[in-house]
Amino acid sequence: MIGNHILTQYFSDTDDHHIALFGNGLIHKTYTVSTNASPAYILQEVNTAVFKSPLDIASNLDALSGFLKYNNKEVFFPSPIFTKLGEPYAIESNTYFRLTPFVEGTHSLDACSSADQAYEAACQFGKFTAAFKGMDVSILKPTIPSFHDLSFRWQQFTEAMQHGNQDRIQQASKLIEQIQNDFTIVSRFQSIISSSHFLQRVTHHDTKISNVLLNDMGKGVCVIDLDTVMSGLLISDLGDMFRTYLSPGNEEETDLSKVFVRPDFYKAIIAGYLEHMKDQLNKEELDAVNYAGEFMIYMQALRFLTDFLNDDTYYGIKYPMNNYDRTVNQLALLDHYKAVTA
């Protein structure tokens, strides 16, 4: 547990500040900082194993905040607070800590349980991207290089097929065949990234519902966890929402009867996202809305299978066959998605 000494880099007097662990985030350790018994700030310990260049994140957030300040002031953007020395992080023992205001009267969700929630979340992510219309996205740094590059993920898979655990390759032969039979998803991605019709925009890249703050009426307020905000394509944000909102069973579910697409959620995501983005998308991009789900679900299945073949070196596992089961889960979701959206 960290102590108040971190906060001395932000405040002169920290006697009435209380730090408590907050939430169940998988990447960063997150804490609330309370004053007078009420949460006032969020303090995060940045995971530099995932985000190897924290200053790139800070550079991006500064650029995004500056753009909104001069172009779109009505969009709420929870910018980090600078230290007393004007730095974006408090650094101690090579560990980076970031402080942001606590947004009162809001909450987040761990799972999407209604079409209304799917709509509100998608509306916020669409509003977020739309707010940066006209921004030069080339100035944004890739905080996780090749994060949603399906060609790169396919290359990792083919290397795992050559150098991975041979026993596991044999064990997963049917899953490997399924992955290979859907290579057209990779081919379409390659066509998209080489097309001038698909525009690079400010893209969140991690649109799970826990990254949206809602008010007490269940209405969206803003998006949070902006570390993965980079230049990207609409298929990333839409695809991630499809992958994580549509099924009542998440990627850890082994009962495949709980892994399926809820059509009303699918329609709600599209309606919410297009609420702010429809006028910014061209025909080719609109035609790729359905593909976005195939793209993201397939890519996640590919990544889980690749990790299984490589003896689970990337994703944390709870039991030896965890990544294998996650692959089965995502391929089942992909099949159902293709059937529903055909």
Image (cartoon, rainbow, N blue to C red):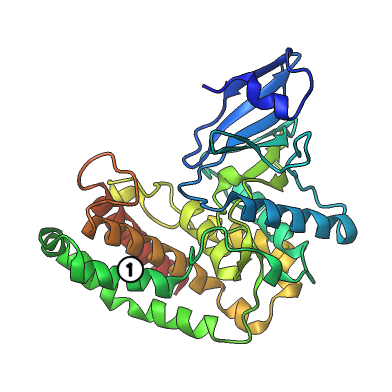
Q: In which quarter of the image is the C terminus?
A: bottom left
Occupied quadrant, residue 165: bottom left
List x then y, in percent, for residue 235. Answer: 55, 69
Please give the name of the residue rendered at 58% of the width and 63% of the height, measured from the top-left corner.
142
Please give the name of the residue rendered at 37% of the width and 50% of the height, measured from the top-left corner.
251
Query: Circle 1 sits in a helix, a strand or a loop, which is it?
Result: helix
Please give the name of the residue rendered at 41% of the width and 83% of the height, measured from the top-left corner.
187
Classify residue 135 as left or right of residue 264. right
Relative height, residue 108 to residue 223 (above, below): above
Amino acid type for the residue under numbered disc 1: Gln
Classify residue 50 as left or right of residue 86. left
Report crowding for label 1: few under 14, some 14 to 19, many 20 or more residues within 10 A (C-alpha): some
Classify residue 184 as left or right of residue 221. left
Residue 40 shows in this picture: no
Classify residue 302 as left or right of residue 232. left
Please give the name of the residue rendered at 73% of the width and 58% of the height, measured from the top-left corner.
127
Name the foreground residue: 124 vs 8.
Answer: 8
Residue 228 shows in this picture: yes
List x then y, in percent, for residue 15. Answer: 73, 12
Relative height, residue 133 to residue 76 (above, below): below
List x then y, in percent, for residue 26. Answer: 46, 40
User: How many marks are shown on the rendered structure?
Assistant: 1
Relative height, residue 22 to residue 258 (above, below): above
List x then y, in percent, for residue 79. Answer: 75, 45
Name the foreground residue: 179 vs 342.
Answer: 179
Q: Mark 1 points at which residue?
A: 156
Occupied quadrant, residue 319: top left
Name the foreground residue: 326 vs 319.
Answer: 319
